[in-house]
Image: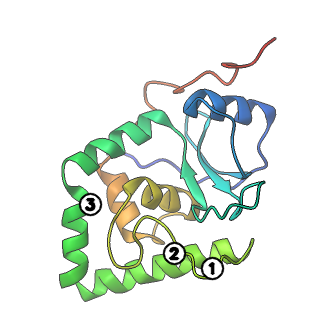
């Protein structure tokens, strides 16, 4: 990646954000709390979800990547074996393992500030392995650079997914 996406502040979701989410994922949002990161194109690319869905079901994934272009590029990294390589490095690099454990603790702290989900893991395989790059990238985009080392590494491997313009029109899916 030539230039990582800029950090953005979390915002309350607007009607246009909710319409963009529906167009991105093909369904309405569940447990949506905030737009945790906004793509340089203007659309949400990471949302913050409640630790419990409306029906009370635990949902431990605090940051959910919604941009289909970013998700597709991350899927390519996963298919190329990046998760396995990162997991192996965690076993042999104590400094990386400590930074990744700190990322796990940050994730839990942020989720617990909303609602404690006793006994539930963080997400993405943290703190011992890499199970989902989508979660790690979502965490890095929402929390900012330096919080999740493997999320930051994955972002650095991605193409600039926003360069082609918005992945969806905010008006897609709206009747008007």
- Between circles 1 and 2, the one closer to the viewer is 2
The residue at 27%/42% (across/down) is: 76
Residue 52, image x, y percentages: 71, 62
Q: Dot 2: what SS?
A: loop
**Do the residues bearing badges 2 and 3 touch, measured as CB atoms within 8 Å?**
no
Q: Which residue is mark 2?
A: 121
Distance CA(mark 2)–CA(mark 3): 18 Å
Q: Residue 125 vs residue 83: left or right?
A: right
- Residues 109 and 10: in front is 109
Q: Earlier in the sequence, mark 3 or mark 1?
A: 3
Residue 64, image x, y percentages: 56, 52
Distance CA(mark 3)–CA(mark 1): 24 Å
Residue 159 is at least partly visible in this image: no
Q: Is residue 138 above or below residue 121?
A: above
Residue 117, image x, y percentages: 66, 76
Distance CA(mark 1)–CA(mark 2): 12 Å
Residue 174, image x, y percentages: 75, 18
Location of residue 106 (image quadrant) = bottom right
Residue 24 is at least partly visible in this image: yes
Q: Earlier in the sequence, mark 2 or mark 3?
A: 3
Q: Which residue is mark 1?
A: 109
- Residues 98 and 165: in front is 98
Q: Is residue 18 above or below residue 52?
A: above
- Residues 120 and 108: in front is 120
In the picture, which quadrant includes the N terminus? top left
Q: Which residue is mark 3?
A: 83
């Amino acid at each position: 990646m030539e230039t990582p996406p800029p950090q953005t502040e979390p915002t309350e979701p607007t009607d246009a954000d909710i319409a963009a989410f529906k167009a991105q994922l093909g369904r309405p949002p569940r447990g949506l709390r905030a737009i945790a990161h906004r793509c340089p194109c203007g659309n949400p690319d990471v949302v913050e979800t409640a630790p419990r869905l409306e029906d009370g079901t635990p949902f431990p994934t605090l940051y959910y990547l919604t941009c289909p272009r970013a998700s597709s590029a991350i899927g390519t990294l996963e298919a190329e074996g990046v998760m396995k390589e990162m997991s192996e490095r965690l076993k042999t690099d104590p400094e990386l393992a400590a930074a990744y454990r700190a990322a796990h603790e940050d994730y839990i702290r942020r989720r617990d500030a909303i609602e404690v989900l006793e006994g539930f893991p963080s997400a993405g395989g943290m703190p011992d392995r890499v199970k989902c790059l989508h979660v790690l990238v979502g965490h890095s985009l929402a929390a900012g650079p330096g919080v999740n080392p493997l999320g930051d590494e994955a972002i650095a491997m991605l193409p600039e997914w926003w360069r082609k313009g918005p992945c969806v029109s905010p008006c897609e899916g709206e009747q008007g």
